[in-house]
Image: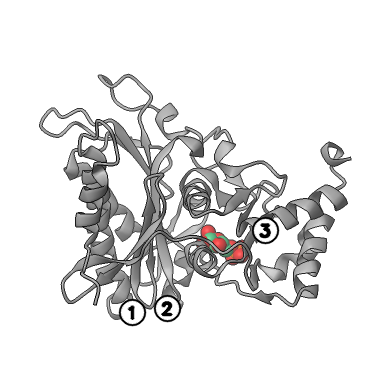
Amino acid sequence: MNRIVTLDEFIIRRQKDFPFASGELTGLLRDIGVAAKIVNREVNKAGLVSILGVAGQENPSGESVQKLDLYANEKLIDCLKNSGECCGIASEELEDFIPIQPVASKTSKYVVVFDPLDGSSNIDVNVSVGTIFGIYRRVSDPESPCKMEDFLQKGTELVAAGYVLYGTSTLLVYSTGRGVNGFTLDPTIGEFCLSHRDIQIPPRGGHYSVNQGYYLKFDVEMRRYIDHCSDMNLGLRYIGSMVSDIHRILLNGGIFLYPNTRKYPQGKLRLVYECNPLSFIVEQAGGKAITCQLERILDLSAEHLHQRTTIAIGSPGMVDEMKAFVERYSAAPSFR
Ligand code: P6P
């Protein structure tokens, strides 16, 4: 029987991988773990308390906000604010970033971006939802409050990223740029325990993941690729919760697509706090993540916090194949 390795122990052991590590990133990751446990407690009993239902508000992207979104947002902010390990936060639920005052005059060098509860439209029907987070080293003057430029760095500048999946079990998956590891929450001891060591995405998988209902709204090259997936007898798996769909692909292989449509000409998913952190994780596990216009997600420049992007992410062999279809069938002049 393998010895239990808790998230705290693992993070602290890995801290020595970082030269000049000051323990701040370690503290930040542990604080996110605490917030995940608090959110998990409410997600697991959402059906039992009057926390369900729409809060009657809209988030900056114009989507109706579930009460649990607000709860998760508040808990993540509280944990990060009180840790003294981060100097600023940007969230899907906040129009603008919020600078965090130093705790005990400690000047933190990190900012955190997160989607507190992705897939929240699934909450009331008991389908898995997730938290997505990314951590950057600030680039603005360390003696002054953080600035927007700290949050709009390219995904290649992430120092850590991860997600929490509130599913049949609660799983925290993260990377600090040296591989991807997963930790399952053991509720009997209240600890995340190492359960998925050094995750490597399979080169191909048996499923593709896309909202087939939009098929006729996709560009011809995406329709041709989706037809190819069907011709290859791939199964279609689409939960409508990005963290759940990406986690399945991380473990079993496959490809997730959210192309541009008439409703979302730039794509629906947000670059800063959804696509960049998940692309960081998938690339660290040996996968690929590009836009449907074939740019590497992590190389994209973010012009504003809630910027959207198209995405094709997953097994390297399948992303390469999708790329070949775009190059062959796209009418875009750059591919002629
Ligand atoms: P659609 C959830 O609202 C979300 O942001 C992602 O988690 C998910 O992959 C996507 O949107 C689903 O969008 O248009 O297929 O319902």
Q: Tell me if mark 2 has few (under 14), some (14-19) or many (20+) residues whose alpha carbon lies within 10 angstroms of its own.
A: some
Element class at badge 1: helix
Quadrant showing the N terminus: bottom left
Q: Is residue 243 above or below residue 177?
A: below
Q: Amino acid at mark 2?
A: Asn
Nearest to the eye among marks 3 and 2: give it: 3
Answer with left or right where residue 302 lies relative to residue 39: right
Quadrant showing the C terminus: top right
Q: Tell me if mark 3 has few (under 14), some (14-19) or many (20+) residues whose alpha carbon lies within 10 angstroms of its own.
A: some
Q: Are marks 1 and 2 in contact (CB under 8 Å)?
A: yes
Q: Is residue 235 above or below residue 113?
A: below
Answer with left or right where residue 124 lies relative to residue 105: right
Residue that badge 1 annotates: 47
Residue placed farthest to the left in the image?
A: 104
Task: Say which of 61 and 206 sits in front.
Answer: 206
Residue that badge 2 annotates: 126
Residue 116 in view in this figure: no
| Residue name at image x 28 percent, y 20 percent | 144
Q: Amino acid at mark 3?
A: Gly
In the rendered image, residue 263, in percent from the top left (x then y), is placed at 69, 55
In the rendered image, residue 166, in percent from the top left (x then y), is placed at 37, 69
First in sequence, mark 3 or 1: give its number. Answer: 1
Q: Tell me if mark 1 has few (under 14), some (14-19) or many (20+) residues whose alpha carbon lies within 10 angstroms of its own.
A: some
Q: Is residue 20 above or below residue 235?
A: above
Quote the CA–CA distance across marks 1 and 2.
Answer: 8 Å
Q: Which quarter of the picture shows residue 237?
A: bottom right
